[in-house]
């Protein structure tokens, strides 16, 4: 089950990064044209030139960052819940309960 969840996170990360890169690439191209002072920066020819190379670099980056974040987050939550269970089992109930929850 953990492997299936990991794969889903990795695939979702790849799709998300690829989609965001593909959708924002034309905006970045237009911004660069404007910064270079081109007279017709809003023209559509060549607006996606180079997007394949960017996708080849950005999709693995997205998989590594977002996918590994989800995997590590799950591992940390699991470890934290184990530590909290041990702490709660060894503490008295008065100290384990947050101060706002203690009846006066």
Image (cartoon, helix red, strand yellow):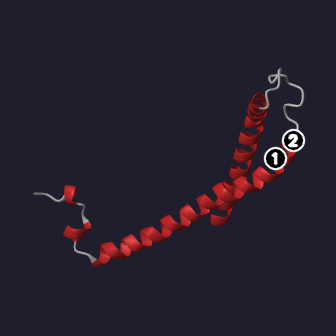
Q: Where is residue 6 shown, x and y percent of the image?
A: 66, 61
**Crowd class of label 1 (few under 14; some 14 to 19; many from 20; radius 10 Å):** some
Q: Which residue is mark 2?
A: 50
Figure quadrant of residue 21: top right
Would residue 40 be found to the left or right of residue 35 on screen?
Answer: right
C-alpha gap between disc 1 and disc 2:
7 Å
Residue located at (89% from left, 26% from top): 45
In the image, taking residue 100 as reference, residue 16 lies left or right, namely right
Residue at x 80%, y 22% (from the top left corner): 42
Q: Residue at x 83, y 51 (%)?
A: 56
Going by the picture, which residue comes out furthest to the front? 37
Mark 1, secondary structure of its residue = helix
Looking at the rendered structure, the number of numbered marks drawn on it comes to 2
In this view, 38 is above or below 24: above
> Residue 54, labelled with which disc?
1
Q: Position of residue 8 (x, y in %)?
A: 68, 55
Q: On screen, 46 above or below 77?
A: above
Callout 2: helix, strand or loop?
A: loop
Is residue 25 visible in the rendered structure shown here?
yes
**Badge 1 vs badge 2, beta-carbon distance below 8 Å:** yes
Badge 2 crowding class, 10 Å Cα cut-off, few under 14, some 14 to 19, many 20 or more, is few
Extreme residue toward the left, this view: 104
Return the x and y of residue 77 as percentages of the image width and height: 49, 64
* Image-based side of 97 in relation to 16, left or right: left
């Amino acid at each position: 089950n953990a492997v299936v969840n990991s794969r889903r996170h990795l695939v979702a990360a790849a799709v998300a990064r690829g989609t965001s890169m593909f959708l924002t690439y034309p905006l970045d191209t237009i911004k660069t044209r404007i910064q270079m002072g081109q007279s017709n920066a809003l023209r559509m020819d060549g607006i996606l030139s180079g997007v394949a190379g960017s996708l080849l670099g950005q999709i693995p980056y997205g998989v590594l960052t977002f996918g590994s974040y989800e995997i590590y987050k799950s591992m940390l939550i699991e470890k934290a819940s184990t530590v909290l269970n041990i702490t709660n089992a060894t503490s008295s109930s008065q100290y384990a309960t947050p101060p706002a929850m203690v009846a006066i």
